[in-house]
């Protein structure tokens, strides 16, 4: 039988990554089919869907074995993927951004009598739902420029292990090997910029741009005061208008010490259309004092890339749709989602959405060509139906 043309495209990408030399042929075959299924419209995250949507020739139980027991090294896969991403990103003569954030893959709380619950789940507070939800909490690291963004690494947050999300972020940052001639800015929201994490970034030559909580201590003229208290003394004439994209902000620039850092810039900002009250205040830290107010705000806005990734990875690639139960299988599933995401972006050379649209169109053409070629070769229709899982 003919091989599907869109599967050949996935194989070529694996060859470019160097995976075909690192992983066995059966593993490569499984990965091709799984990436095909993940990028198919209508995929729900189940192994049944992987088997059906990718026209997998083996029995569905081989996929469960692949995720749970097969002796392939997902860390090697991620390592090759990360090498490729950095080579791709560093070609561009632009600042390099590294975004850190976490997300919850929500699951149904199992009955206390459930014999086979999904491993590694716990209660985690969801800021979106304003309550604790059951599931896996993942800390993600994303690498991007002004024009292209790639998910880069992830860690499962396990409360029982006693390792914090900040510790996991530092672990991922420590393994990030970037050429020293590239300026790197680590972007994070107000939950992450602890003293230890900022020091880790600075020790690697990375700058930090982060949202600060309004109760962070500043030291204007050597006096310790919370940012929100200090903001009460700022008059309209003390600020300047800054435009970023379609939004305008009133900005007061503070330079000096903050709690945990001897020398930094903190922008106290309000949207121009809102009153300058503490509830509308946003404080943005930059350890790079050379940046203008416009650049600090413009760079921080790049953090939106990771929020978009979370939404698209869940909606389009079913990052949270898995039903495998073993924690190793779950981590492998996330690794393949990351692989499928990078493949989609690489093929379109644009965004994840554009990549998925391209791959889905390519798959449609591939199936039509497959059926047409089979007819030309007088292959019985029952054989074609069986391979395409419509028998």
Image: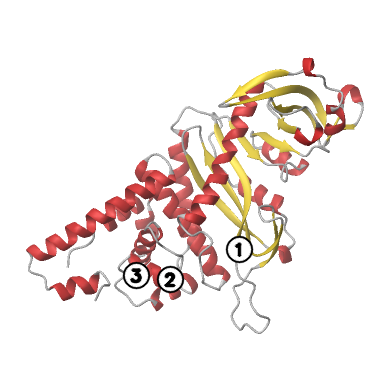
Look at mark 1 in the image and give the residue it sits on.
106
Q: Nearer the viewer, residue 133 or 284?
A: 133
Q: Residues within 10 Å of mark 1 (few under 14, many from 20)?
A: some
Q: Quadrant for the N terminus, please.
A: bottom left
Q: Nearer the viewer, residue 223 or 128?
A: 128
Residue 278 is situated, as x and y percent measured from the top left of the image, at: 81, 33
Residue 188 is situated, as x and y percent measured from the top left of the image, at: 66, 41
Q: Nearer the viewer, residue 64 or 247?
A: 247
Distance from the alpha carbon under mark 3 to that under mark 1: 25 Å
Mark 3, secondary structure of its residue: helix
Tell me the quarter of the picture where residue 218 sits. top right
Mark 2, secondary structure of its residue: helix
Image position of 2 (left or right of 242): left
- Mark closer to the observer (1, 2): 1
Q: Residues within 10 Å of mark 2 (few under 14, many from 20)?
A: many
Distance from the alpha carbon under mark 3 to that under mark 2: 8 Å
Residue 138 is situated, as x and y percent measured from the top left of the image, at: 61, 57
**Marks 1 and 3: in contact by CB < 8 Å?**
no
Q: Residue at x 50, y 53 (%)?
A: 313
Residue 174 is situated, as x and y percent measured from the top left of the image, at: 63, 46
Look at mark 2 in the image and give the residue it sits on.
47
- Marking on residue 129: none
Tell me the quarter of the picture where residue 176 sits. top right
- Marking on residue 52: 3
**Marks 2 and 3: in contact by CB < 8 Å?**
no
230 up-or-down from 59: above or below:
above
33 up-or-down from 249: above or below:
below
321 up-or-down from 219: above or below:
below
Residue extending furthest toward the top: 237
72 up-or-down from 368: above or below:
below
């Amino acid at each position: 039988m003919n091989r599907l043309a869109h599967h050949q495209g996935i194989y070529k990408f694996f060859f470019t990554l160097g995976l075909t030399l690192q992983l066995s042929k059966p593993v490569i075959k499984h990965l091709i089919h799984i990436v095909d299924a993940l990028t198919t419209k209508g995929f729900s995250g189940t192994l049944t869907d992987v088997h059906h949507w990718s026209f997998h020739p083996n029995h569905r139980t081989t996929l469960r074995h692949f995720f749970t027991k097969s002796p392939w090294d997902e860390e090697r896969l991620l390592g090759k993927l990360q090498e490729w991403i950095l080579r791709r990103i560093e070609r561009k003569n632009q600042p390099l951004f590294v975004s850190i954030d976490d997300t919850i893959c929500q699951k149904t709380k199992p009955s206390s009598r459930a014999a086979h619950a999904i491993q590694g789940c716990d209660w985690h507070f969801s800021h979106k739902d304003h309550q604790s939800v059951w599931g896996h909490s993942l800390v993600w690291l994303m690498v991007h420029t002004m024009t292209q963004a790639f998910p880069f690494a992830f860690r499962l947050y396990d409360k029982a292990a006693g390792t914090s999300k900040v510790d996991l972020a530092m672990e991922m940052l420590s393994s990030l090997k970037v050429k020293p001639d590239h300026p790197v800015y680590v972007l994070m929201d107000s939950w992450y910029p602890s003293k230890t994490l900022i020091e880790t970034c600075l020790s690697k030559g990375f700058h930090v741009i982060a949202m600060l909580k309004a109760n962070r201590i500043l030291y204007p003229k050597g006096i310790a005061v919370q940012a929100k208290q200090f903001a009460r003394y700022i008059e309209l004439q003390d600020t300047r208008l800054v435009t970023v994209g379609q939004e305008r902000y009133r900005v007061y620039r503070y330079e000096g010490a903050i709690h945990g850092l001897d020398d930094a810039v903190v922008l106290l900002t309000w949207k121009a259309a809102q009153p300058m009250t503490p509830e509308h205040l946003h404080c943005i830290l930059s350890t790079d004092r050379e940046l203008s107010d416009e650049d600090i705000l413009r760079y921080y806005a790049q953090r939106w890339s990771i929020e978009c990734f979370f939404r698209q990875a869940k909606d389009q690639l079913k990052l949270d749709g898995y039903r495998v139960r073993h924690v190793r299988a779950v981590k492998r599933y996330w690794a393949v989602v990351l692989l499928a995401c990078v493949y989609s972006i690489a093929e379109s050379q644009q965004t994840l959405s554009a990549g998925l649209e391209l791959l889905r169109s390519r798959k449609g053409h591939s199936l039509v060509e497959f059926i047409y070629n089979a007819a030309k070769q007088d292959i019985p229709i029952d054989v074609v139906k069986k391979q395409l899982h419509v028998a």
